[in-house]
Image (cartoon, helix red, strand yellow):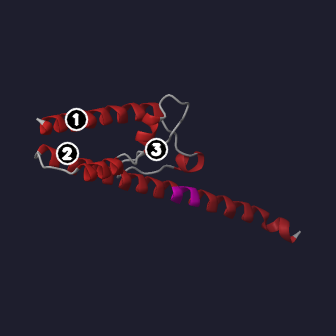
Amino acid sequence: MGLLDYLPHLIYSTALTSVSMHHLFQRKAAEANRAHVAAQISILEDLHTRLAAREDIPDREFDRLWRLARSHDVWRAEEAEGMDVNLKSVHIQPKETIGWREVLLGRRFDTSRTEELDRKDLEAVRMEVESASRSESR
């Protein structure tokens, strides 16, 4: 009889612990993704500024910076475009809160829309870099 008296409390405490751990994981994943994207933007802006100023950037350094900027799953999505791959990325605004529905059921991803916007941004950056490199070679 003693164990049955405490069973509801064990279930509630297990559920609350699970929900809080899931919520913490979602928050930390969002923070890490924001930091990663901010670093990627910083690298690309620095590269753009240097190319716009017609600064001579060694090929080795350019390749290193480009690889650092490519270390995001948007690039992997582009490379795996022909395959049936569903890569997820978390895009949360800095002031956005995570609701209980997301905590309990998880985040829903609209990967097709996200990948479409990321491809457009990627293409714009790629065109800027190519036009800057063409104008440098002249």
Tell me which segment is drawn in magenta.
21-25
Screen quadrant of the N terminus: bottom right
Bin the neighbour count of mark 2 within 10 Å (Cα to Cα): few under 14, some 14-19, many 20 and up. some
**The furthest residue to the top:** 82
Question: Callout 2: helix, strand or loop?
Answer: helix
- Indicate whether residue 114 is drawn in magenta: no
The amino acid type, in three-letter code, at marker 2 is His
The residue beneath circle 3 is 89
Q: Answer yes or no: do the residues labelled 1 and 2 have beta carbons within 8 Å?
A: no
Residue reaching furthest to the right: 1
Estimate the spatial distance between the alpha carbons at disc 3 and disc 2, rounded to whole Å: 25 Å
Q: Which residue is mark 1?
A: 130
The residue shown at (42%, 51%) is 97
Q: Which quadrant would residue 119 be assigned to in this image? A: top left
> What residue would you read off at disc 2?
48
- In this rendering, does residue 14 appear at all? yes
Q: Please state which amino acid type lies under the numbered disc 1.
A: Glu
